[in-house]
Amino acid sequence: MTLDKVVGSAQEAVADIPSGASLAVGGFGLCGIPMVLIQALLDAGVDGLSVVSNNCGVDDWGLGVLLAKQRIAKMTSSYVGENKEFERQYLSGELELELTPQGTLAEKLRAGGSGIAAFFTQTGVGTQVAEGGLPRRYHADGTIAVASPAKPVQTFEFAGSPREFVLEEAITTDFALVHALRGDRHGNLVFDKSARNFSPLAAMAGRVCVAQVEELVEPGELDPDGVHLPGVYVDRVVVVGTGIEKRIERRTVREGN
């Protein structure tokens, strides 16, 4: 593994991502999304992707641009609002969806990156998350083609009483795409406030992680105590600069006093 992980362009960074690959993508709404890498992937023409991300962007931004060109075959997400094309493809049977509680999704990614095959959680017990039956894919006529399976449920003595927990398997993917505020040539990354969101977890879960950074610094310039993601999880770094477009998913303002 080379210590200098900087590559010359986003196109070069994603060039070996094939059709049918699985991707973990950082971001929450439109906050902290690796848009330059997503655009490069769109331009590369790959399709049949299985994407794990909190959501799928909006119709014309974020992962929504891949969805609009029908490059995504399956989404694993916790939230699927704000995207009419997502709704259309899912309900018409063109897109498979694995809905996952948000905290569970985060832990599934973290577990995958930590070498933990599965874990038990109380989230989802007594619902279709554990009992199965959630529609993953529809037929064109609206009937269910694929439903989620039932998951093992086990009782543990926890916090002084017996409680039921559902078994959730970890997530690992072929590649991960993330956005960071700052990074060094060794791949150590620093994220900006809430843009940190799912990014470290997605990066950990991907066997090959590609990070776009706004600012590149030399090794040793980042405070070790301030590093949010160690370079051991990052394979490629692309500098995109500070002038990249950043959109707000839903702009709200309050009335002046």
Image (spheres, rainbow, N blue to C red):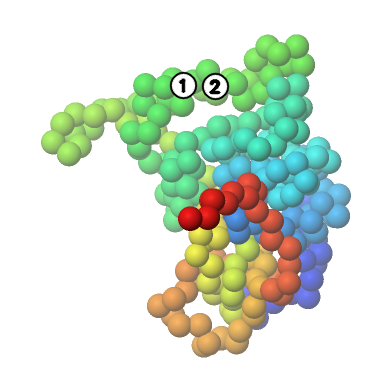
Marked residue nearer the N-terminal end (1 or 2)? 1
Q: Tag 2's secondary structure?
A: loop
Residue displayed at 63% across by 31% down: 97
Q: Residues within 10 Å of mark 2 (few under 14, many from 20)?
A: some
Number of labels in the image equals 2
In what element is the residue under mark 1?
helix
Is residue 248 or residue 64 the one in the foreground? 248
Quadrant in the rendering for residue 123: top left
The answer for how far apart the CA atoms under marks 1 and 2 are is: 6 Å
Q: Do the residues bearing badges 1 and 2 touch, measured as CB atoms within 8 Å?
A: yes
- Residue 138 coordinates in the image, percent (x, y): 69, 19
The amino acid type found where label 1 is placed reads Gln
- Position of the N terminus by quadrant: bottom right
The residue that appears at 63% across and 63% down in the rendered structure is 179
The answer to whether one can see residue 102 in this image is yes
Residue 160, percent across and down? 13, 36
Residue at the location (60% across, 21% down)?
135
Counting from the top left corner in percent of width and height, residue 189 is at 55, 72
Taking the image as shown, residue 156 lies to the left or right of residue 14, namely left
Residue at 43 percent of width and 43 percent of height: 103
Q: Residue furthest left?
A: 160
- For mark 1, does the 10 Å Cα neighbourhood hold few (<14), some (14 to 19), or many (20 or more) residues? some
- Residue 116 drawn above or below residue 189: above
Question: Which of the labelled discs sits on residue 209, or is there none?
Answer: none
Query: Which residue is labeled 1 in the image?
Result: 128
Q: Can residue 205 be seen?
A: no
Q: Which residue is mark 2?
A: 134
Query: Three-letter amino acid code at disc 2?
Result: Leu
